[in-house]
């Protein structure tokens, strides 16, 4: 039976950190479903269609990855996709409390779904979509943080 994992998140927008986690997950799982949440962030810079589009472009040519969006509970989405595992990225200790809370809540909601965590390469362990957007709004060069076309899309949005 093929091992499928769901990687849910806001991806507003995709960064090299997300891509690092996806590539690591592909070493363990047969298929990775990157699931873009409609409602994860109240005021996203990119709408869900744009976030899916940027992810698809960023992951072009990488086999065994599917990009989708969802607007139901993560555990219900996982069951709908016939998967049992959720993957999340862990950066600094600051991620831990929120991720721990969410993993245990999901376990309470559905005991058959397990959450596993992966750490990105050190060079991405400080990267977040939120910080990148803030830095871009102050004119930062986004090279090394996001693929060039994502940088362009951010700058386009921010004007
Ligand atoms: P969410 O709003 O669900 O946290 P994000 O797009 O911010 O959505 O993150 C999705 C997942 O990817 C989370 O598990 C987050 O910890 C992880 N993640 C985000 N940035 C990085 C990074 N630079 N390295 C590793 N994991 C990351």
Image: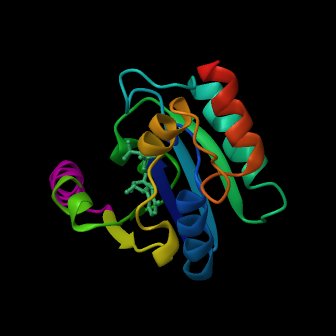
Is 102 covered by the magenta stretch? Answer: yes
Residue 18 visible in this rendered orientation of the protein: yes
Main SS, magenta region, reads helix
Which residue is at a point 63% across and 32% down the rendered structure image?
A: 154
Position of 28 relative to 83 (above/below): below
Which residue is at a point 51% across and 32% down the rendered structure image?
A: 138
Q: Position of residue 72 (x, y in %)?
A: 39, 32
Which residue is at a point 69% across and 59% down the rendered structure image?
A: 65
Q: Is residue 145 left or right of residue 133?
A: right
Is 147 covered by the magenta stretch? Answer: no
Position of 151 relative to 17 (above/below): above
What colour scheme has been applied to the protein in the rendered image? Answer: rainbow
Numbered label tally: 0
Q: Nearer the viewer, residue 154 or 40?
A: 154
Position of 157 relative to 75 (above/below): above
Position of 98 relative to 69 (above/below): below
In magenta, the rendered stretch is: 99-113
Q: Nearer the viewer, residue 137 or 105?
A: 137
Q: Is residue 34 left or right of residue 150?
A: left
Q: Is residue 11 left or right of residue 51?
A: left
Q: Position of residue 59 (x, y in %)?
A: 74, 55
Determine the residue located farthest toward the right in the rendered image.
Answer: 61
Q: Nearer the viewer, residue 87 or 93?
A: 93
Q: Is residue 129 left or right of residue 145?
A: left
Q: Position of residue 124 (x, y in %)?
A: 50, 67
Q: Position of residue 66 (x, y in %)?
A: 68, 52
């Amino acid at each position: 039976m093929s091992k499928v994992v769901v990687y849910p998140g806001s991806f507003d927008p995709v960064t090299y950190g997300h891509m690092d986690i996806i590539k690591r997950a592909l070493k363990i799982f047969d298929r990775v479903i990157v699931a873009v949440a409609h409602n994860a962030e109240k005021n996203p810079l990119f709408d869900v269609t744009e976030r899916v589009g940027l992810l698809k472009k960023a992951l072009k040519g990488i086999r065994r990855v599917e990009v989708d969006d969802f607007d139901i509970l993560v555990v219900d989405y996982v069951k709908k996709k016939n998967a049992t595992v959720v993957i999340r990225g862990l950066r600094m200790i600051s991620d831990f409390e929120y991720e721990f809370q969410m993993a245990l809540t999901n376990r309470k909601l559905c005991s058959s779904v397990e959450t596993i965590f992966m750490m990105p390469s050190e060079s991405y362990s400080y990267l977040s979509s939120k910080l990148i957007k803030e830095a871009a709004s102050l004119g930062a060069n986004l090279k090394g943080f996001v693929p060039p076309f994502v940088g362009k899309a951010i700058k386009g949005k921010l004007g």
